Image: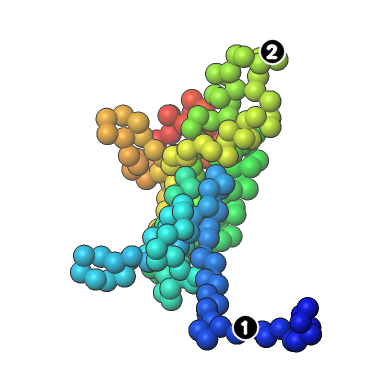
Amino acid sequence: MNSNGRNKAKVIPLFPHPKSPRPEDPVAHRNRIGATFYLHEGRTKSGRPRYFMAKTIGEGALAKVPEGFEICESINGVVSVRRMNDARATVPPDDIALVQSVIERCSHLHYYLARAVDSAIVIYEPNPPPKQLEEMVFEYGTGHLPADAIAEYMAHAKYAPIMKFEPQGGEYVVRRMTFRGHGGWSYPMNSGKLATLARQMIPSIGTDKFFELA
């Protein structure tokens, strides 16, 4: 009741503003370096849909991965969208784990990684390797780089392929990266059971023996 003793009328707008629908959060992927990418849809010149990842949310952001596609990340943290392909997953997970376990038993191969690439198991070398990085650092009074500083650096390191195991006739063949001329993969150096090849060949990585492999 107002000062005149009458009820104050409630004003109701004739055309109330509709509530804006809250957009769904776009699909996000955080890579190993800590950068976040968001899924978007664009169009090719012919008008076909094109899916890509971007660091900022823009026009065409998607809240769901389109059917038949998947988000993938390369060894160096590049995030992209690709068509799902069952034929791509031809490396048994146990074989990848076997190679990685041999790497981890070699103290000089800390931070080296094994990944499936098509039908092969590829070992990647960080650049520079932690041992070389430590030798390059002189500003620390102890003469070496602290472990936490190395771990921080390696989280942003670039990786390059150094050795790979390819299936062949129920076994594997092994190749190493060459650095003469145009470089590239060597011819098959040896073949056999994966466990045997891994134990024989992997410890040579990062040593002078690596360049003597034939």
The type of residue carrying mark 2 is Gly
Q: Residue at x 59, y 60 (%)?
A: 94
- Pinpoint residue 40: horizontal percent, then vertical percent: 41, 63
- Pinpoint residue 67: horizontal percent, then vertical percent: 43, 76
Up-down relation of residue 214 to residue 36 (above or below): above
- Pinpoint residue 36: horizontal percent, then vertical percent: 53, 52
Q: Quadrant of the C terminus?
A: top left
Residue 143 occupies quadrant: top right
Name the side, left or right, on which 80 lies relative to 2: left
Extreme-left residue of the structure: 46
Q: Residue at x 60, y 85 (%)?
A: 12
**Residue nearest the observer in this picture, 122 or 196:** 122
Residue 158 is labelled as none
Residue 211 occupies quadrant: top left
Circle 2 packing at 10 Å, graded few (<14), some (14-19), many (20+), is few
Q: Say what secondary structure mark 2 lies in.
A: loop
**Residue nearest the observer in this picture, 136 or 43:** 43
According to the picture, the residue beneath numbered tag 1 turns out to be 11
Q: How is the image coloured?
A: rainbow
Are circles 1 and 2 on residues that touch, CB within 8 Å? no
**Residue nearest the observer in this picture, 18 or 8:** 8
Up-down relation of residue 63 to residue 163 (above or below): below
The type of residue carrying mark 1 is Val
Extreme-front residue of the structure: 4
Q: Residue at x 47, y 38 (%)?
A: 158
Name the side, left or right, on which 101 lies relative to 172: right
> In this rendering, which labeled residue sits more in front, label 1 or label 2?
1
Circle 1 packing at 10 Å, graded few (<14), some (14-19), many (20+), is few
Q: Say what secondary structure mark 1 lies in.
A: loop
According to the picture, the residue beneath numbered tag 2 turns out to be 141
